[in-house]
Amino acid sequence: MEKKARRTSAVEILYRRYVGDNGERRASLQEERVNAQVAQTIYDLRKEAGLTQKELADLVGTTQSVISRLEDADYEGHSLSMLDRIAKSLNQRMVVQLKTKNPNRGTIRYVFREVVRGLRRKQGLTPEQLAAKLGLDRDEVIAMERQDDYRPSPLTLFKLSKFYGVSQRNLAILAGAISDASHEFQQEVSKFAAQSESFAKLTREEQQILDKFITFLKTEVQTSDGRQDSQGN
């Protein structure tokens, strides 16, 4: 059965034509979307409360003209303090959420923990033994294998890369010290994360998955801007 061709919308055509891969235009579009969303949210909450702009302004302690500007999608002067005052006046709670630009950052850090744990177990070492070989504290070895917020020092990354024969730069990307991960790198990380659950027992299949990924970490890949990056230590 033949699949129907996906119809391209006019919005998609305009987006590709006028925004495309232009970083500045994308940022500008995103800012406009945020302004429009904030304006629409204030308007919807005010209407839901059955208030006029003047009545909401009186509750907040400002003027009707300020509320009018805040409900304008083109207005760029939103402040967190004013938005919080409006939220409280309407019995709402404002939540500010900051997200990483790289949606795969959590996955990449997870892979770092799995890789260092898997490599240690492949060597048949306990955390204490690895710490002794690398000149590290046992607590640091445990932290790098278990804690999501662990950030290794450049010296620790150097010791790990030398001991396991893995690119220091690649380890730095996995640890979150470098954000310049190429598309190919992110794809390999996602593939590895999907295949691995935990290397607590390190079965033959898990060892093969680990070996394959370590081989990739030793190869030469492109940086995110398309340059060739040597994976040597």
Image: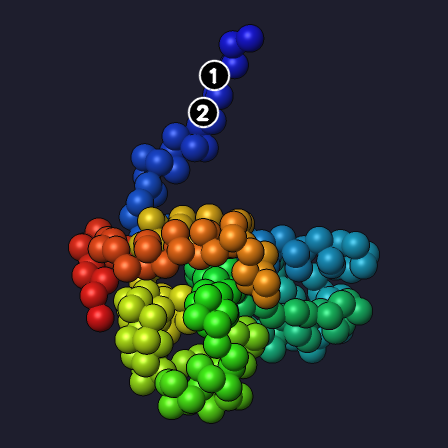
Residue placed under numbered mark 1 in the picture: 5
Residue 154 coordinates in the image, percent (x, y): 32, 82
- Quarter location, residue 52: bottom right
What residue sits 34% from the left and 43% below the top? Answer: 19
At label 1, counting other C-alpha atoms closer than 10 Å, the crowd grade (few under 14, some 14-19, many 20 or more) is few
- Left or right of 40: which side holds 99? left
Q: Which mark is residue 8?
A: 2
Amino acid found under the numbered disc labelled 2: Thr
- Front-most of residues 161 and 173: 161
- Front-most of residues 228 and 205: 205
What residue sits 38% from the left and 90% below the top? Answer: 135
Q: Which mark is residue 144?
A: none
- Front-most of residues 8 and 154: 154
On the question of residue 41 being in view, the answer is yes
Amino acid found under the numbered disc labelled 1: Ala
- Left or right of 199: which side holds 219? left
